[in-house]
Image (spheres, rainbow, N blue to C red):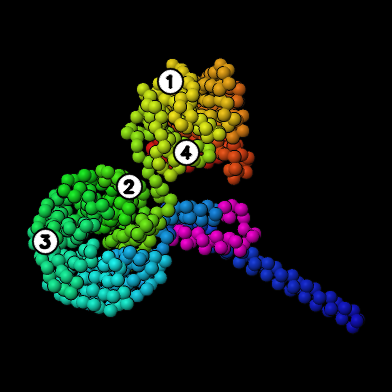
Amino acid sequence: MILGSAIVLLALTGWAAYQYARDAAAQKQAAIAQKLQAEINDIKANIALSNASFASRQRFEALLISIRTARQVQQMPQLDVETRLQAQAALQQAVYNVRERNRLQSHTARVMAVSRSRDGLIASASADNTIKLWRLDGSLVNTLKGHKDTVLSVSFSPDGKTIASTGLDQTIKLWRLDGTVLQSWQGSDRRIQSIQFSPDGKVLASAGDDRLVKLWTRDGKRLTTLSEHQKAVLALSFSPDGQTIASAGEDTSIRLWNRDGQLLNILNGHTDSVWTLSFSPNGQFLVSGSTDKTVRLWDRNGQALQTLAGLDGHRKPVKAVHFSPDGRMLVSAGDDYLLKLWLVAPLTSKATLLTTFAGHSNTITDLEFSSDSQTIISASWDKTIRLWSMQGVLQNVLTGHTDPVWAVKFSPNGNTIASASEDHTVKLWGADGTLKRTLPEQTKSILDVSFSPDSKTLASAGEDGTVRLWSLDGKELRQFKDETIFLTVSFSPDGKTLATGNALDGNIKLWHLDGKPPQTLQGHRKRVWGIAFSPDGKTIASGSSDGTIKLWSQDGQAIRTFDAQQSEVLGISFSPIGAASSDGFGQTLLSGGEDGTVKRWQLDGTLIKTFAGHQQAV
């Protein structure tokens, strides 16, 4: 009995140990699963936070969050594919759209002004009573202490060795870069809003609430006083040659003075305080920004050239404007927390909005460009100085057409760009943007162009119902005529066939370069805007104002028709050879529509995805 009891006891003990071990293992597995789920939830939360930051225009924050999330994903090989793809999409979205490249954060109060030296140093003035020196890489070089109140303005001397500053304590100070005060004097009995070095570095101009513009020597001796303003003067700018001074302020006018203090001109047009001024690098133009929410361009003689406002403009007061050193662009900013970058036409100084940078969370008070015009520097009441990259914004501007441009194509070898215009011409450009040649002018608008696969021949088509083949030296090689208007023309991948889309009867024509009669593809009920050959040349896709996409065989037989779910289909493109695609090269289509959407399709007509965001037709 004792032996039996012992055996039973041992069995029960073993069973209990087994149960304990099994429960412990289960608890461990549950803890691991719980930890894994918590990590997955954290990743999903970060993806959502990145997307929310991106949507609210906090693009730099979205980038930082998505980078952190990508690192989490890398450390979780067991993560499900869908979440992994969402994290990748958030990272790509941030990387490809963020323009902010660095953020300088050390001031403890509002940043009021910035100035850049020729050597690339940045000086920032703040309501924390300090001036800070930075490098473009974000490293802090020095902090200059000595003002007893907010520093409102700062200016580097042309040689970059001296800094001038002023502000609420009514003093003007000159500093060495090591923080040594070289000179300090009482500049006014009221707040001084602006200080500027002349281009030769010999003279300083100051202005402020006493309604005066004062010119000083570097040792604090007053040279002259300009006293025509009726209210506080908020902004100053020297012309590049140093012979003209522009001043503006609360009385809404801009005054131009010569260096001797003689009033040259008064520029009227703004309806509220003018906060900021900047001369163009060639000295021929002036830009101003105002509480009236407009940016205005003037010639040096005071002639108003353009007012930047409306849909493209700012919705709140403009506090800062600045021309780029190359004169091709200007940037504006203010109380709407946005930077707007404008392209400036070389001869007329007319400006067109290029893009808008968002990220600051308070008023932007001052702007600068780097010396190579590739970085914008902004100062804000949000206590930061931010650096914005121009990379990807603008490579070059090709000017020459005198009417709207309907089409632009790269040659397959990438050496030539062809453009077609309502001015009846086709222009050929080098890849660097230089105009190589204008083809002989036609009688009507040219609406499309297409390069042959070997890049040696160009086809043009348009309103006169003629397709013309050109050599790149400008010789006309051949013509194909029809009683219609050609909206689109496309070379086949083997270079032996041209496809054209018709504006009058919805037909498509295949023109054979070997001399065979053309084929007519009938099926669309309205004009054909887009034609594309698949990369292997075996399929032709067409898009029409009838709202359908049609697929045709290379011999012109109808294969398939599907509803594009767009009111009009205005553009068609196959996925190219070499495209990263799980469904094969050339096996998906993109269509652009009158409804402002881009849609991606399988060739059986299945809609893969709709890209929405454009406000007008694609």
- Give the mark, 3 or 1, whose residue is nearer the N terminus: 3
Q: Is mark 4 on a helix, strand or loop?
A: strand
Task: Tell me whether the residue at label 3 lies in contact with that at label 1, contact meaning CB atoms closer than 8 angstroms.
Answer: no
- Type of amino acid at the residue the image marks with label 3: Asp
Q: Can residue 74 be seen in this view?
A: yes
SS at mark 3?
Answer: loop
Residue 484 vertical placement versus 383 (above, below): above
In the rendered view, would you say 223 is above or below 95? below
Place of residue 197 in the rendered image (x, y in percent of width and height, measured from the top left): 22, 65
Residue hosting label 3: 260
Q: Quadrant of the C terminus?
A: top left
Looking at the picture, tell me which residue is in the foreground, 257 or 574.
257
Residue 93: give x, y in percent of width and height. Answer: 48, 52
Q: How crowded is mark 3: few (under 14 residues within 10 Å), some or many (20 or more)?
A: few
Q: Mark 4 points at which residue?
A: 416
Q: How far apart are marks 2 and 4 (CA)?
A: 24 Å
- Who's the residue at 81% across and 75% down the image? 14
User: In the displayed structure, would residue 436 be above or below residue 201?
Assistant: above
Q: Tell me the distance, in whole angstroms, between the alpha carbons under discs 2 and 3.
A: 34 Å
Q: What segment is highlighted magenta in the picture?
A: 61-85
Location of mark 2 (residue): 343
Q: Earlier in the sequence, mark 2 or mark 4?
A: 2
Give the Cα distance between marks 3 and 4.
Answer: 53 Å
Could you tell whether 427 is left or right of 47 in the image? left
